[in-house]
Amino acid sequence: MVGNPDAVHPEHGKSEKTAGKGEGAVSSLREFVQEIEAWLQKSLGNPDIPERLRMAMRYSLLAGGKRIRPSLCLACGRMLGASLDALMPFAAALEFIHTYSLIHDDLPAMDNDDLRRGRPTNHKVHGEALAILAGDALLTDAFGLMASVTFPAERVVRAIAFASACAGSSGMVGGQALDMEYTGRSGVTLEELRHMHAGKTGALLRAACVCGGILAGADEARCAALSRYAAAFGACFQITDDILDETGDTAALGKTAGSDAANGKNTYPALVGLEESRRLAVGLAEEAVAALTGFTGPDAEFLKALAQSLATRSA
Amino acid sequence: MVGNPDAVHPEHGKSEKTAGKGEGAVSSLREFVQEIEAWLQKSLGNPDIPERLRMAMRYSLLAGGKRIRPSLCLACGRMLGASLDALMPFAAALEFIHTYSLIHDDLPAMDNDDLRRGRPTNHKVHGEALAILAGDALLTDAFGLMASVTFPAERVVRAIAFASACAGSSGMVGGQALDMEYTGRSGVTLEELRHMHAGKTGALLRAACVCGGILAGADEARCAALSRYAAAFGACFQITDDILDETGDTAALGKTAGSDAANGKNTYPALVGLEESRRLAVGLAEEAVAALTGFTGPDAEFLKALAQSLATRSA
């Protein structure tokens, strides 16, 4: 139940480890989501943004997504010593990027989806041209947000470089291009599917975790652990997404269930069956938890519990 | 003749000022364009970029544009003490951004253009979906290029923030949104037209000039002068673009002449007539040159000569 801010709350995932002042506690997704929503609500206030463009950007940005990427960034960064306030513009930037990718993916020339997060897609409401521009603007503004954080400049530059690499031609956009190429094609292998998803879904989740670490000043080894966590988390997330598309219902998902099959998408259930997909998801959630061995405190416990909740999510 | 790399060559714009070792000399657009083309040719070599996406990106990136934005960045930065090599990734990033904006502007949902730089537009060759993604990837990768430069990190962060503000919702994309809104609408004022163009065309030219200065470590006053130069340059550029669309021919322009009128676009010639448009262009070129009073050397002379050549360009 990643979609529910209450899913990971203090009652879950109590830690037996000594975790400083937060011993036994776990941060909650609800806390992160509230902070993020409040911040996003106040964003895009620049009076120089043309009003229609601002409305199109806000329509999708404030559609109540799960806020997984910014939450991961905030949790990873705070786990390593940074404050939520300092991390927030960068975390929000990742949600800007995620949002732009959804707007563009839904376009008629792409997945041609009419429904997203329970509402008509951006182009259905604002028209195709403005939807394209709203996506472009969210993506561009994201890097301005990243450059606005107050961490030491060397870290900021490194984090921006990492986020760009994850979101660009060899990351998220590359994965989306492969997804299109594979759609309707038979004979796609599990390895090709994994590689495509590592770009399309995994890369931005990796940016969220690793950039949180970079901004907090984490060393190589810790950033590598965050990267391993994120890779397993992302793969698990995608598999459960595929499973839900096949087994969930449109109302709970907020998007058209069964659209993968209808669109000839290559999915884990289609390739290895539902049962094996569920087994893979559980294994990846465990892998994510294992990557954080040695990290302690409320945010570490939150990250572990979030990964565990993924494998059994229903929305 | 901005389109011709020979247009601003050593015979033009001899300076009477003392300009150090470069006294009386002027850098040439040909020099900049050659360096930029060579750099762009070697870009996008990351083997992790899916091949079809790379081809779609290269199709537009290497279509032989005028390379005005990177040239301005290189000239402004070198004029203030930075080296071409150090500036190049940032300058190239601005061409990535310009190229993405052309790909998306040409889409059927936007201007629906079939011809660009004398060739079929990106979506005509690679399909709409891949054209959207190629644009998204060029925009995203641009910020990675910016973050890759070796200047002091504080300057890099400032330059990225500035470039994002110029290219995003309150800059270039905002101007494009206004252009769409104004298209086909009667009663658009000269002030509205100016504001729209300051975003759509002017903002990225301003990023090119000012970021060159920021990276070179220029002080506030010098950056402000570069900004004034760029603002006048951009306005002049747009007016002459409008004039050429009305008076030029398709072969020389490499794009469909007369498309502005056919598309109901608001233009300077439509609003104030051809003669007044030409007068405005000449005045703005002079304003650009005046902004650089006090700047000397080959690159200063180049920038002044380039502005002067704008007012009478034929392509």
Image (spheres, coloured by chain):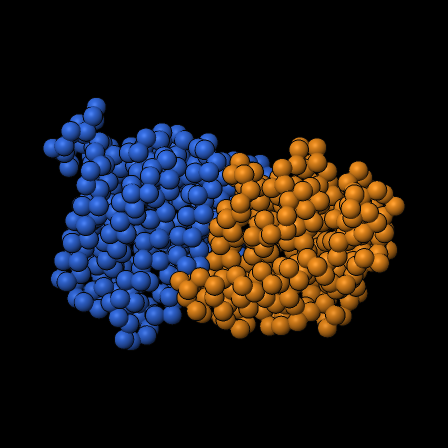
Chain colours: A orange, B blue
Residue A140 in the figure: left or right of residue A173: left
Q: Depth check: give the residue in front, B286 or A18.
A: A18
Task: Determine the image quadrant of residue A229.
Answer: top right
Q: Residue furthest front?
A: A21
Instruction: Please state the horizontal and vertical placement of residue A151, each as a whole percent of the image.
Output: 55, 42
Q: Depth check: give the residue in front, A65 or A100.
A: A65
Q: Depth check: give the residue in front, B189 or A113.
A: B189
Q: Residue furthest top?
A: B21
Is the residue B39 above or below the residue A43 in the image?
Answer: above
Task: Determine the image quadrant of residue A212.
Answer: top right
Instruction: Please state the horizontal and vertical placement of residue B148, each as a whole percent of the image.
Output: 49, 36
Residue A119 in the figure: left or right of residue B311: right
Is the residue B115 above or below the residue B63 in the image?
Answer: below
Residue B182 in the figure: left or right of residue A239: left
* The N terminus of chain B - image quarter: top left
Q: Depth check: give the residue in front, B73 or A157.
A: A157
Residue B20 visible from this viewpoint: yes
Instruction: Please state the horizontal and vertical placement of residue A200, each as a whole percent of the image.
Output: 64, 50
Residue at image point 59% right, 66% down: A62
Residue at image point 39% right, 52% down: B166
Is the residue B73 above or below the residue A22 in the image?
Answer: above
Residue at image point 49% right, 69% down: A55
Q: Residue furthest bottom?
A: B186
Residue at image point 31% right, 59% down: B197
Instruction: Please state the horizontal and vertical placement of residue B302, each as a whole percent of the image.
Output: 22, 37
Q: Residue furthest right?
A: A16
